[in-house]
Amino acid sequence: MTIDLTDRVDAEPAETTQTATWVAICRLDDLVPERGVAALVRGTQVAVFRLLDDAVYAVQQLDPYSNACVLSRGIVGTRGGAPTVASPMYKQVFDLRDGACLDPMGKEPVDLVPYAVQVTDGVIHLALPPTVAAQPTTDPPTRP
Amino acid sequence: MTTVTRTRDRTPDTTGRKRLVVVGGGMAARRLIDALRARDERDEWAVTLLCEETRAPYDRVALTSYFTGRDPDALALGDQGVWDDPLVTIRRGVAATAVDRHAQTVTTSAGTTLGYDALVLATGSYAAVPPVPGKDLRGAFVYRTIDDVADLRTYVETLRRETDRPLRGAVVGGGLLGLEAAGALQALAVESTVVEFAPRLMPLQVDEGGGEALRRLIEGLGVTVRTSTATAKISGTRGRVARMVFAEGPALPIDVVIFAVGVRPRDELARDCGLPVGERGGVIVDDACATSDPNIWAIGEVANIGGRCLGLVAPAYTMAEIVADRLLGGEGTFPGADLSTKLKLLGVDVASFGDAFATEPGALEVVISDPVGGVYKKLVMSDDARTLRGGILVGDASAYAALRPMVGRPLGGDPAAYLLPEGAAAAPMGDLPDDAAVCSCNNVTAGTIRCAVADKGCTDVAGVKACTLAGTSCGSCVPLVKKLVTTELEKAGVTVSNALCEHFDLSRAELFDVVRVQGLTTFSAIIDRHGRGRGCDICKPVVASILASLDLGHVLAGEQATLQDTNDHVLANLQKDGSYSVVPRIPGGEVTPEGLIAIGQVAQDFGLYTKITGGQRIDLFGARIEQLPAIWSRLINAGFESGHAYGKALRTVKSCVGSTWCRYGVQDSVGLAIALELRYRGLRSPHKIKLGVSGCARECAEARGKDVGVIATDHGWNVYVGGNGGFTPRHAVLLAEDLDTDTLVRTIDRYLMYYVRTADRLQRTAVWQADHEGGLDAIRAVIMDDALGICADLDAAMAVHVDSYEDEWAAVLSDPDTLRRFGSFVNAPDAVDPSLAYVAERGQPRPATPAERQDAGILIAGTTLEVRR
Ligand SMILES: Cc1cc2nc3c(=O)[nH]c(=O)nc-3n(C[C@H](O)[C@H](O)[C@H](O)COP(=O)(O)OP(=O)(O)OC[C@H]3O[C@@H](n4cnc5c(N)ncnc54)[C@H](O)[C@@H]3O)c2cc1C
Ligand code: SF4
């Protein structure tokens, strides 16, 4: 199911090219504009969002405020010019581009880990940081 | 624990302080204690309150609401936390029996003696009973305390069980109290006759024209009125009242009689200890509320101030404030009584203010009398027709709030303009001077309200109420307070913003209207025309709810799916660990054994935690997102449908078992509850909506805690609106009585639809109806008298809702496209979220705590039990 696409890294900015492993996740068409999906990548959960202009962003799926893996289920919108997602649990708002917490709802701001994304031939790819990339590439567990 | 500690603290705490004893736990006493505790910053005084009644001070003014609510606690006054204050001791059911002024002690009915440094007499009045023969028969009542009304109710209800004919009652006295009492008899479904000695009703407050208008309005409500009639005696059979005999004319058969001929001050303690009392009673006090004994004060109805006793709560509160001030070394004096009153008697507005009877020389009267519309309005003006002196309003007192503060000031404009029906023309609002009293109950001036906005940063009516107490007693000044606040905010350059969020400048109600009128059907079209950006978690669900209320398609269809909160998006309730709960609809809480077994089997197969909800249904917890379709296909096969527990929508219609089983039930509450739940299921609204139906006045379904509560009567249904539990519990208020089922349903249709259309985001019905211009009366006019001409439209909208209802879950299961949204992971739709972990507790799963997660040994993995399909 997971395809290693390390051969395409030259298309990416130098910063990520040196360390990242690119992994194909799903087709762009699998996502509805302005909604997110969860992806399971080598045991790590990632929230992936598609916007109206087909830009795709990815951040960690774990909501740091509730410790539940739910951010892909939040409402997508904007704050000023920034594309955002609001946690479905306690409504903190995050910038989808860099994971910055824009509205901590009265708590201490905690930022999210952002993931670089590339869409090639209608397929969404995520750049995995080395720690995640080092996990075994077994298929995600499915229910018996 | 805390209470125990507090009680122990009490004794040491109070030593070394000055001792205040307050006799009489009524409305004046309550205000005194609040004022004193708020201002006594150095905790100089320890207060003991002696209450002859067995309860803490309550709202006597609202006594008649006991017949609609029947809950004495609903009459409680103010914050009950004050009775936990270590410097306040309340002795319920303990009367003061004597005062020894030399020893400075009070003897109580409990046999104890209390020393005092200051003593306040706040003993109020007792209801006078005229010396007519037969006044002591059973079935004769007075109308003053909760015990009085509870006894009256019990008597009537017992009698009703023994008699099959309609019960008849009479009220002696056609003043304020008499009409209140007639209202009580009406609420008890007793035919009533008001007998008044004077030639008109409310002779103290209104003139002949007003009395005539009032009579017509009250007779229109089915109350018989006999003026210029003297009661000669009450005759009885077997010790119970049976007939009322008059000085002239035939006798009146009666089952119950209420004396409401006036009140007399309870000045017996003062008399016995030698304090001077007035000729017609009442403890004589000066304008500081001090008696001739420097350590004794008197406040409220028992005080004889300026040569008379005052039977209204506003002057009682003023006196309480003065004594609190004096006890702390202040110099407050009584400014003279404002005897203005605005009342709602049997639903009829009556207001009387200033020099209502035009007694000042040269006074001119401007009168509008509309016998057909049932309205009588009179303004009394100075001889040059410029200065307002007073007035009387019967039938429509909406101008009262604006007029009363203008007494003694130039009106600025044609006086008649103030008397036109509300909305006909904007009354010319003369600039209210800063010293004009706006709230007479709490003595708050226009200046104080302006200052609360300008200097204290209040930005809305609620803030001003909290800060100044304006509008917190009788509430008649709230419209004026609102006007002042808005004007002041505008002056300060603050635009009063109802904006939904940064994306929309419109409020929810405004947005609802433009969407409906312009026929917009998508979020993109709406935000393009009326907003900016791409929305957020505030405005998107609002638009989704508006589109759903207008029945513009399935909540998960097309772009609408992107607007929904996760609960609405996956039609389940998100729980703290990211799993969901599932609630099948169980209309009216009625479920077959087969249904129960089916739900139990689903819970068992999917490893779900089960709990009965407060809304009489069953909540299944711990469902993973990818399990939801399988769970629902099982539930749907067993005959269940979505319960909309996830939506801002109708939740449940709770019911008691009603007349089908219950010994007391008078109507089929379960049948009605089911019909209502099936009618309104799926209705999207600004906030969740709950209904309740009780089969009789015992109210086992707690319907008055619901947005719409229906209570069966012998003649049909009473409907109450605007109740809720939660953070700020509210009791629903009576909207209409004795409706037949069709009228009831139509009334609820309109109430709900009007709410859905005009309420703000997340505004529950209680707040909506309180904030609605003109309050519940205005809403009643809209939905029952079609005051805005929109009833046909509301009815049609509800018909569309009822006709287009479909079960959302059935729709989801038949649409493969939508079903894809329930995959756990886009790249592994059936994989179990590895972060979920559960432990067993009392035989069921629950989410593991962080500590338990460390200890993997006790974890049940996510509920991956074998599933029977
Ligand atoms: C049905 C009804 C409707 C009303 N409507 C209005 C209205 O619309 N507007 C308005 O302004 N006013 C209204 N009033 C009048 C208003 O309720 C009174 O003016 C107000 O309650 C007076 O307060 P108070 O504290 O002086 O007396 P109360 O509230 O009567 O309190 C006196 C208390 O002292 C207790 N007491 C007496 N003697 C002793 C003793 N020796 N030891 C211990 N306790 C003692 C009594 O039991 C009583 O509880 C209404 C009254 C009634 C009954
Ligand atoms: S409210 Fe009345 S009918 Fe319903 S259960 Fe209670 S007593 Fe019976």
Image: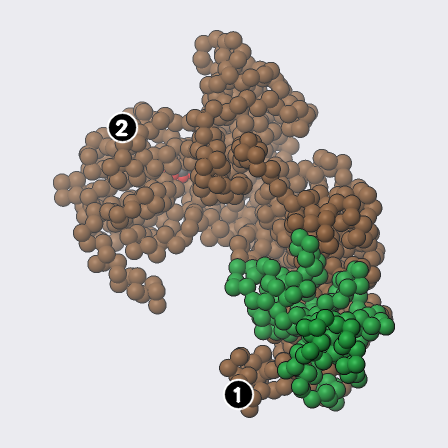
Chain colours: A green, B brown
User: Assess mark 1: CB under 8 A from ligand 2?
Assistant: no
What residue is at 56 percent from the left and 48 percent from the top?
Answer: B68
Q: Amino acid at mark 1?
A: Asp
Residue B238 place in picture, x, y as percent: 47, 47
Query: Label 2: which residue?
Result: B286
Residue B220, image quadrant: top right
- Name the chain letter of the residue that bears numbered label 1: B
**Discs 1 and 2 carry the same chain letter:** yes
Q: CA distance from mark 1 to mark 2?
A: 76 Å
Near-viewer residue (B177 or B777): B777
Of the four image quadrants, the one with ligand 1 is top left
Report if residue B799 is visible in the image.
no
Left or right, A140 with respect to B416, comes to right
Residue B855: assigned label: 1
Left or right, B523 with respect to B435, comes to right
What residue is at 78 percent from the left and 73 percent from the top?
Answer: A11
Residue B515 place in picture, x, y as percent: 78, 46
Residue B415 place in picture, x, y as percent: 58, 17
- Name the chain letter of the residue that bears numbered label 2: B
Q: Residues within 10 Å of mark 1 (few under 14, many from 20)?
A: few
Report if residue B146 is visible in the image.
yes
Q: Residues within 10 Å of mark 2 (few under 14, many from 20)?
A: some
What residue is at 48 percent from the left and 8 percent from the top?
Answer: B362
